[in-house]
Image: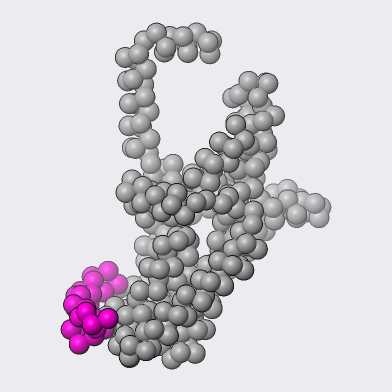
Amino acid sequence: MKKSLLSFLAQNQIVTALLIVGIGWLIVEIRGVLIALFVSYILMASIEPYAQALKRARVPGALAVIIPYLFAVIFLILILLSLVPFLVSQIQILLSRFPSYLSPDVRFLGIPLGAVNLDEIAAKELGNIGENVIAFTSRIFGGIISVISIFAVSFYLLLYRETVMESFISLFSRSSQNKVRKITLLVEDKLGGWLRGQLVLSGFIGVITWVALTILGLEFALPLAVIAGLLEIVPTIGPIIAAIPAIIVALNISFPMAIIVGIAYFLIQLLENNILVPRIMQRAVGLNPIVIIIGIIIGGKLLGVPGALLAIPFISLLVVIYRNI
């Protein structure tokens, strides 16, 4: 059946071309669903080792899956309830004051920085966020329904992991099933390790940036640190982008303070690249910085912010498959 189908497609190039175009159109139309599934798979892969550890400790299968998710949800709720209201108010104030930081009186290397009308952006985008934490989280995660769906899909993927994996492997010929199983397990390990490592790195960079900016006496240390932690997910160019608003705020104090803040960000990244990344991300797939930048640009162009953020794990997935094939 498979050979006859392949022979038919090989002999009918017009049908093959139409089929390729149709598949491409379908992928574009359901790209949101595919992104959600990919995120769910990464989340499942990151939690799977903890579920396996609980199973080895003789915890029942379903309970071993529920416990890690329950801890993750409780931790997320505690962070949102304790941090988000204060963080939102700080971001509102920062955006409303940003035009004054970019006033013509502020100069960088003798070049005046023109004012940007960010107070209107703050009023438009964050006007009601301080009163509604749920609305803020829904904007950040692309809708609270999407977040719940991603958690639910990843939960069931983990609960029925063996069944799903065997069903996927059965699509291949018997001679290649062992190799497909090996590659699938390796992809899970790499993607799970990537997410766990990124969470640790983002948390560490956020905390150490907050401590450094607080010691330097810079205003808005917390929102600037959160920006640094979030942009840590985007390697190579993320830390550079994160340093820009902090340096601009420091310029409002003095040029030497801006230099000091820039040096602080540089030292933090030096610590990360030489100590943290080799230890924390040692199980993640290493990629060339040029490949990373190109991947982020292409992902952002095709799918916006989600595409830019998911470009690295997707490229890592392709690299793992390629190396093993």
Q: Compared with residue 215, is residue 87 higher up or lower down, i.e. above or below?
A: above
Q: Residue at x 49, y 90 (%)?
A: 215
282 with respect to 230 (left or right): right
Relative side of 211 to 11, left or right: right
Left of 169 or right of it: where is 125?
left
Residue 25 x/y as whole percent: 32, 32
Q: Residue furthest front?
A: 109
Q: How many marks?
A: 0
Let me know if residue 118 is in the magenta part: yes
Please say if 261 is above or below 291.
below
Image point (18%, 84%), residue name: 104
Q: In this orientation, does residue 222 appear?
A: no
Tell me, yes or no, if residue 95 can be seen here. Answer: yes
Q: Quadrant of residue 249?
A: bottom left
Is residue 284 part of the magenta span, yes or no? Answer: no
| Residue shown at the point (37%, 55%) measured from the top left | 305
Frontmost residue, 207 versus 267: 267
Q: Nearer the viewer, residue 202 or 236?
A: 236
Image quarter (top left, top right, bottom left or bottom right) of the C terminus: top right
- From the top left corner, tell me how far across and down residue 189 is, in percent: 64, 48
Kindly indicate the quadrant of the structure image that contains residue 32: top left
* As drawn, 42 above or below 241: above
In the image, residue 309 sits, relative to residue 23, either above or below, namely below
Q: Position of residue 175 (x, y in %)?
A: 68, 21
Residue at 70 percent of width and 56 percent of height = 50
| Colour scheme shown | one colour
Q: Which residues are magenta?
A: 99-126
